[in-house]
C-alpha cells in the first residue's frame, strides 16, 4: 500500500502533542479531597461508568487518526507489464564431414567444440526460433526453426560425423546453404540469420556455392560464416575394427583448407560477417559476438492502476467520532 499525500501523516504529530497537553492539564485541574485514611476508599469498587469515563475522548482521538490516514489517501498499486517481443529466426548450418574429427580443438575435436559452443549459444537465447541443418557430402535438416530449445539441445548432442551417421562424406557448401535458406524463406521474423560453420571447401553436391549464395540473398538472409580449424597438413582420425571386433583409432595425413574467399563473400554479400576460429576459445568468442549483434527486440510497456483505499478509513473516522460524541453526551456524560 502507498500513500498519495504522505505529507498528511504529519498531522499525527500535533494530535499526539495536543492529547498529551490535555491529559496533563486535566490531571492538574482534577479536584481533590483530603482524607486521614484511604482504607474506606479502597473498599469502594469503581463502576463501569467510572472505568469508561475516558472512552469518549479515546474514540474521538481514534476518529481523528483515521481521518488523517484517509486524508493521506492510501492506495493499492497494481502494475502490469506487457512485453512486445520481436524474435529472430536463426538456422545453424554445421559441417559434419569427417575432417571435423581433426583433434586440434578442445574438448576433443572440431565437431565436439562446435557442438559445445552451439549448445551454449542456444541456451542463452530466449525468444528466437532456432533451426539446425547438418551437412557433409549431402545436407539434412535436423530441426526446423522452433522455440523448443530442449529438443534442439537434445538433437545437437546427437550430432555425429558423416562416417558415424553413415552419410556421404564430403563438403557440399552450396547444397547446405540452399537447404538452410529454404528453412528461412517463409519466416515472418524481423531478422533472418544463417550461422554457417565449415572447416573445408566445396567438393560435393548438386548445387554450387554461388547458386546457394544467390538463394540466401534472394530471401534476405544474413549469413554469419565461420571457418573452423587451422589450414595446413594435419592428421585425421580413422576408426576401424580389429579381428576381435574392437574399435581401433588410427590417423591418416590430411591437408586442411578453408575457402576463406567464399565464406567471406557469403557474409559480405548478405550483410553478415566472416570469422575464423582456430581454437575453441576463438569459436566461443565468435558466437558471443553474433549473440551481441543479433539481439531480440523487446519493447516493455508498463501500466499502473491505482485503487483508492481511503473510504473505509473515512467511514471509521465518522463512526468513531459519532460514537464518542454520543457517549460523551449521554451515558458517560460528566457533570460537575
Image: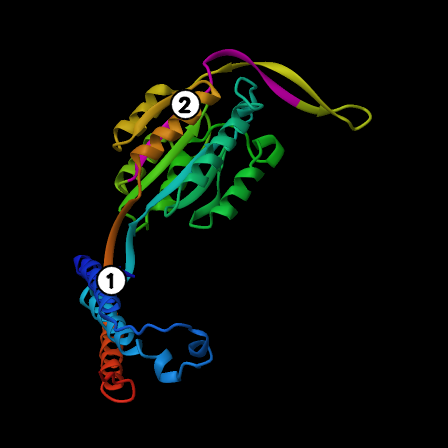
Residue occupying the point 29% across, 25% down: 265
Residue 203 position, x and y percent, is 45, 25
Q: Is residue 325 above or below residue 67?
A: below
- Estimate how packed mark 2 is, as few (under 14), some (14 to 19) or many (20 or more) residues with alpha carbons within 10 Å: many
* Label 2 secondary element: strand
Report the disc number at residue 263.
Answer: none
Task: For marks 1 and 2, give the CA distance.
Answer: 84 Å
Q: Can I make out residue 202 in this image?
A: no
Q: Is residue 201 above or below residue 14?
A: above
Report the disc number at residue 20.
Answer: 1
In the picture, measured across the screen, residue 81 lies left or right of residue 244, that is left
Residues in magenta? 221-238
Q: Magenta segment, principal secondary structure?
A: strand
- Estimate how packed mark 1 is, as few (under 14), some (14 to 19) or many (20 or more) residues with alpha carbons within 10 Å: few
Residue occupying the point 38% across, 31% down: 208
Q: Is residue 244 above or below residue 138?
A: above
In the picture, measured across the screen, residue 315 lies left or right of residue 227, that is left
In-front residue for pair 196/308: 308
Report the disc number at residue 227.
Answer: 2
Magenta stretch contains residue 222: yes
Report which quarter residue 193 is drawn in.
Answer: top left
Q: Farthest residue in the top direction?
A: 233
Amino acid at each position: 500500500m502507498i500513500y498519495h499525500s504522505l505529507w498528511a501523516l504529519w498531522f499525527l504529530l500535533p494530535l499526539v502533542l495536543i492529547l498529551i497537553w490535555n491529559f496533563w492539564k486535566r490531571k492538574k485541574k482534577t479536584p481533590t479531597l483530603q482524607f486521614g485514611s484511604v482504607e474506606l476508599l479502597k473498599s469502594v469498587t469503581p463502576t463501569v461508568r467510572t472505568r469508561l469515563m475516558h472512552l469518549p475522548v479515546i474514540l474521538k482521538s481514534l476518529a481523528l487518526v483515521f481521518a488523517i490516514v484517509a486524508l493521506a489517501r492510501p492506495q493499492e498499486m497494481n502494475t502490469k507489464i506487457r512485453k512486445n517481443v520481436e524474435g529472430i529466426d536463426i538456422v545453424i548450418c554445421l559441417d559434419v564431414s569427417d575432417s571435423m574429427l581433426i583433434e586440434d580443438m578442445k574438448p576433443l575435436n572440431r565437431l565436439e567444440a562446435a557442438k559445445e559452443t552451439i549448445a551454449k549459444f542456444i541456451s542463452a537465447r530466449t525468444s528466437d526460433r532456432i533451426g539446425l541443418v547438418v551437412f557433409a557430402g549431402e545436407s539434412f535438416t535436423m530441426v526446423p526453426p522452433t522455440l523448443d530449445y530442449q529438443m534442439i539441445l537434445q538433437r545437437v548432442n546427437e550430432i555425429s560425423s558423416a562416417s558415424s551417421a553413415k552419410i556421404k562424406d564430403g563438403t557440399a557448401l552450396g547444397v547446405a546453404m540452399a537447404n538452410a535458406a529454404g528453412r528461412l524463406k517463409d519466416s515472418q521474423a524481423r531478422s533472418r540469420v544463417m550461422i554457417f560453420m565449415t572447416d573445408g571447401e566445396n567438393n560435393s553436391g548438386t548445387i554450387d556455392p554461388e547458386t546457394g549464395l544467390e538463394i540466401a540473398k534472394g530471401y534476405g538472409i544474413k549469413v554469419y560464416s565461420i571457418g573452423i580449424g587451422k589450414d595446413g597438413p594435419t592428421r585425421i582420425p580413422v576408426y576401424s575394427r580389429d579381428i576381435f571386433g574392437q574399435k581401433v583409432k588410427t590417423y591418416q595425413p590430411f591437408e586442411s583448407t578453408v575457402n576463406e574467399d567464399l565464406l567471406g563473400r557469403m557474409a559480405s554479400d548478405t550483410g553478415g560477417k566472416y570469422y575464423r576460429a582456430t581454437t575453441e576459445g576463438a569459436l566461443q568468442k565468435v558466437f558471443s559476438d553474433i549473440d551481441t549483434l543479433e539481439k531480440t527486440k523487446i519493447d516493455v510497456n508498463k501500466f499502473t492502476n491505482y485503487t483508492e483505499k481511503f473510504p473505509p478509513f473515512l467511514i471509521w473516522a465518522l463512526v468513531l467520532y459519532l460514537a464518542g460524541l454520543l457517549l460523551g453526551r449521554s451515558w458517560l456524560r460528566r457533570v460537575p
